[in-house]
Amino acid sequence: MTALLDVRNVTKEYRGVSAVSDVSLTLEAGCVHAILGENGAGKSTLTKMMAGAVTPTRGEILLDGRPITFSSPGEALRNGIAMVFQETSLVPSLTVAQNLFLGDEKVFNRLRGLYIAAQQFLQSLNFPVDPAANVSTLGAAQRQMVEIARAVRKNARLIIFDEPTATLTPEEKHHFFELVGRLRARGVAIVFISHALEEALLISDRITVLRDGQHVVTDDTANFDRDKIIRSMVGRTLSDQLYNRDTQRPARAYGRKVLSVQNLSMGRMVRNTSFSVYAGQITGVFGLIGSGRTESAKVVAGVLKRNFFHGGIVRLLGKAVRYRTPRPAVRAGIAYVTEDRKVEGIFETMSIAESIHIGALAASRGRSWLISRREMRALAARWTKTLSIRSINANARVLELSGGNQQKVVIAKALVQDPRIVIFDEPTRGVDVGAIAEIHQIINDLADQGLAVVVISSYLPEVLNLSDRILVARQGRIVEEFAVGEATEEKVMYAAVH
Amino acid sequence: MSGLLGHLWSRRQAATVPSMDGVLRPNDALDRARTLPAAPEPDNLVPLGPDLVFSSGADLFRLTAASPHEGPTHVRHLEAAVTALAASPGGALAAGLDGRGVRIIGGPHDGTLLDGFGGRAVRCPTAAAFLDEDVLYVCLGSTHNGAGDWQRDLMEMRATGSVWRIDLRSKAARCVADGLAFPNGVLIDGRKIAVSESWSHRILRLDPDAARARPEVVLDDLPGYPGRLAPAAGGGAWLAIFAPRSQLIEFVLRERAYCARMLREIPRQMWIAPTLRSGASFKEPMQGGAVKVHGIFKPWAPTRSYGLAVRLDAELAPVASFHSRADGRRHGIVSVCEWGGEIVCASRGDGVLCALPAPSSSPQGKAR
């Protein structure tokens, strides 16, 4: 194999603080290279430097042996380096086909021809996405597919995937891995960033581990196992803490019924679903993408509206409620921690303090026009300490935080609202293992304090490990309930699929 | 136009029922419970000293603790079907008689017949509980229909029930609460009383000493129609839920013209209404909600009858439940009580008494 891209002693500093420090890496054609590390380890910064999104402070990058400096991702793309970002960079108001061919349009474009070409291309990748569909109507998984397809279509020689499988179902992941195999066979170099260590072990040829912006180890995948990777990443073995289930652990007792959803219907996504949520417990909701679990939660939280006629009933503490916007739901004590923090959870350019304070403003009654900076800073300081939000400084923008710390900001924004029920939708998506443990602890603490907690997750070990009772969603409704002692991965998955 | 819009608006809400999940998650505990010898259509379980007394039509029977496997012994034949039964601490019984009143059997007020409360005829006694030898609380389910005509009372959406405090020495009766939707169970809960209100699917707590008791809703939105309440050892209570709610029945209840015609023209067994046992005839509505495959009921099939006993804690919140699902054979649980270290349930729908092992631990509380 030949070295396609050689990264030599690169360093990236923000305001004098190193995000990546003196890292060297060689990427070879036809090789899948996994880059692993906790959130804040510098993975995204390193790959962004490769893709031209970030310029290194020091060090050099060689492409085919020649030093290069990309001024933009577009220039990197013209040189055969494409990056599929963790959060998609599609234009929501355009169709799938228009997004696929964005930047490659001819002077005169025939939309029908565009759709046909896009259809053929998507089918060749086994991606079931309608090319005429507006991107804003697609779910997270389908957006990810379009993003991947766009990179593949550019005939890139190096494709960087940043958390590509986080939103995919097991079947979609299978297709994705096949696609990676085909690209590798064509001699494409692939960089694969994922927090799912099993996936990295499964599809990569080499693994590099970063910690705190520094290179820890690079070796062939055959020389790694899960525990070795985790030890390298965090300096301790976390796998037992995270997902080693204690099936004998007692479930928390049922408290008062806080939420009762009865025969809820919303379009084709939620169909006559019913469930209850109790105080002092973690209610896990598992389901494949498209099972309607997120949509049900969003209806409860006032983000989406249920059907106007025969949309069912939502009862909060016995009282029937119907929220048309999130604000009354927040004021009534419903906090929803979104699965898509970039789009729905945070304002990236705001500071941590401002982001957390927004949550308090949403819940406050009266005087919301009066903002006390001192109160805001005190609030932020308290929650930054409580949730261990790590940042370069107190005024850091949310944009500058790692994924795990961004997620903690979103959680803090929800918890300042003093909720009665907290709905976590994919709480650890795109979060490193260290932050996962911390977020799990936060969730457990909330339930121990007597709050009603709902955890929606596509990651089965997470649901099994956290929940006191597990609800399974399929085709728009809750179809099964398991007690903690009787649930197994096989049983829950069977209920979710069949 | 405005009439049409008004009609559409009134039909906006779906007919919904709460799900049986969490504490009320279905199981087959009642179907696995052992059976006790009983008489047809057992009802009104009351522990009396070491024995268990229950009713069957107009007859009272007794199961003795010394020989529980022997058949029940006949105690007494009363002048009408027994619709309520309570035992005092001293061993007296108060038997509610359908359309007649309340008869006291034994104790210092033996033979007393209470046939009118506050000038109101006692037509529909549904539950009773002694505070002491001289004070009795009685639930009257309806002023229009007898206790045996409970389906009609539901489908007519009546709310004419009341709860009364009776001083047996003076025969003075005081109304504790009125305008209730079929009060069907009463439990002495410290200084207050808890009452199950069947057609409102809830349990109320009333202060009988207050001049005008303001009901406190302690448990509502139940997925079935709550019936009798009985004290549990260690605090809390047992609640019998004698029939399930369903979306179809809730829908029919909203369609008043249809409902009235159904009551007028269709035989009672074929009503779209809850019942203590369904599935006896192929002419019945619902037929397992078309989930009957190859003649076999699926346990999750929508059904008009169901078996459900619920353990409540001292705050009257559910902590455990025992079920007989759509395909089960212990439907129509009308009464539950603790006796001989076991939980005895009367399945009137299937005509059996069944005994469950008592839960290993009970929540602490003050209800009795």
Image (spheres, helix red, strand yellow):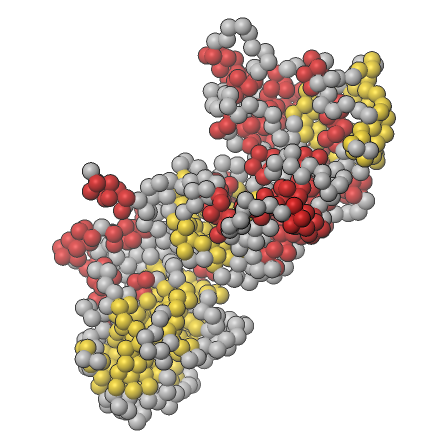
Task: Tell me residue A435's x, y (percent).
Answer: 70, 44
Q: Residue furthest top?
A: A107
Residue A224 versus residue A278 in the image, above or below: above
Q: Can residue A57 be seen in this view?
A: yes
**Quarter of the image where the N terminus of chain A is located:** top right
Q: Give residue A342's quadrant in the image.
A: top right
* Residue located at (49% from left, 61% from top): A256
Q: Is residue A407 visible?
A: no
Residue A211, given in percent of the width and then of the height, sits at 80, 38
Would residue A190 be found to the left or right of residue A262 on screen? right
The vertical placement of B269 against A285, above or below, is below
Left of A202 or right of it: where is B215? left
Which residue is depicted at the point 32% across and 67% down? B197
Q: Residue at x 65, y 20 (%)?
A: A182
Position in image of residue B196 (x %, y %): 35, 69
Q: Is residue A472 left or right of residue A350?
A: left
Instruction: Report the number of numbered marks.
Output: 0
